[in-house]
Image (spheres, grey):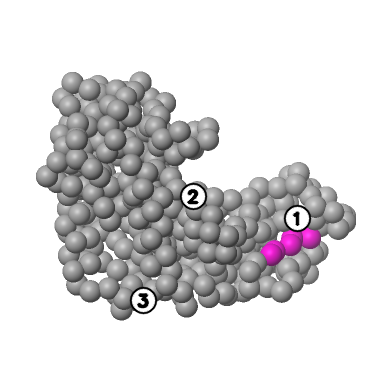
Amino acid sequence: MEIHVLLGFMLCSTHATSATTHSLKYFFTGVTAGTDLPEFTAVSLVDDEPLEYYDSNMKSVISRTEWLEKSVEQQYWDERTQRAHDVQQFFKAYIEKLMELFNQTQGVHVLQRMSGCEWDDETGITDVFNHYGYDGEDFLVFDMKNTRWISPSPQGVSTAHIWNNNPAHLDKSILTQECIEWLKKYVSYGRSTLERTVAPEVSLLQKDPSSPVVCHVTGFFPRGVMVTWQKKGEDHYDDVEWGETVPNEDGTFQTTSRLTVKDWQTEDYTCVVQHKSLEEGIVKRVIEREIRRNQDIETRGPSMGVIIGCVVGVLLFLAVVGVVVWKKRGAGYGETNTSDTGTVNSATGYVNSDTGSVNSDTGSVNSDEPLVRA
């Protein structure tokens, strides 16, 4: 089984996103016993900044940001912790059921959920999402437009059918209303942090003269950034590879883009970086004196090896956090979810432990109770 670790907490490109768009995302991961990872983790993020964290080893929800600690009372953390305990039990029970559905008797298996919402505070436009996955593959995705669950997996069809006939599992208000309300609260609590701007540092890197030229952009905030290449002043998209945007330890972000052409020494290439913090874009011309190689690099990574090590560090950090994503398939993601311990809150992923049960024949959830509110 191939496990895909989420770089920067979300798969994305280096293209810019709206500076006024805020997001609230919830990631839940259950892993079968026998690994070095916690068997269950829950992570929430606002604008791709860590907000809350829980795992089955620590057994309590903790804040990942100072401004949230100052804005809520202890009751908030008690409620979050109780809900995390509930969904942890659900994940453990349902992984066992999924192993039966997939005729699996051993091995490492992963159940995942990603849900949340986005809000543009200038236009008021909102968007929501709710996906489930199992062992790196799509399992269930909620079609918000048509208000129905879809499963690309034969094992998930019965669950999708039952959920589509249960109003509790079709209640979009938890995402379209309550998730948005929480997002607005979080933005108001942490506005000075979430809406700060930090300008990027841009370097041209190269392992050796025959290697691709890398435009390394680091230290910027917010996350949205656009990195493009030009040839003789015209946009150039051929022979270009974009990297993921990943977090630095100080809360800023970094990304890379590689120019794989061989004629960079004879043609006029430039790397252009645009970011909210910049009145004008940063332009780096691809010429010998602008390029840093291993022995020359003195920025955040003193060598290409350190830069690679930084990315590896992010991977290790995320592995510890337990945030694992399944492969992108078509237009969306999938995730597996139903409930041996209760119905799931579509906005938070938390479970009401007093309602619902797993159908032992279909592996789907039977529940007549409404979804738990955030």
Is label 3 or label 1 in front? 3
Main SS of the magenta segment?
strand
Task: State the CA–CA distance, disc 3 to disc 1.
Answer: 38 Å
The residue tagged with tag 1: helix, strand or loop? strand
Sequence order check, earlier mark of 2 and 1 = 2
Q: Residue at x 16, y 57 (%)?
A: 82
Which numbered tag is attached to residue 127? 2
Task: Check if residue 258 falls in the magenta segment.
Answer: no
For the point 22% across and 60% down, the residue is 80
Q: Quadrant of the N terminus?
A: top left
Q: Nearer the viewer's eye, disc 2 or disc 3?
A: 2
Spatial separation of the CA atoms under disc 2 and disc 3:
25 Å
Residue occupying the point 83% across, 50% down = 263
Q: Is residue 272 magenta?
A: yes
- Which is more foreground, mark 2 or mark 1? 2
Residue wearing tag 3: 67
Query: Quick check: marks 2 and 3 in contact, CB under 8 Å?
Result: no
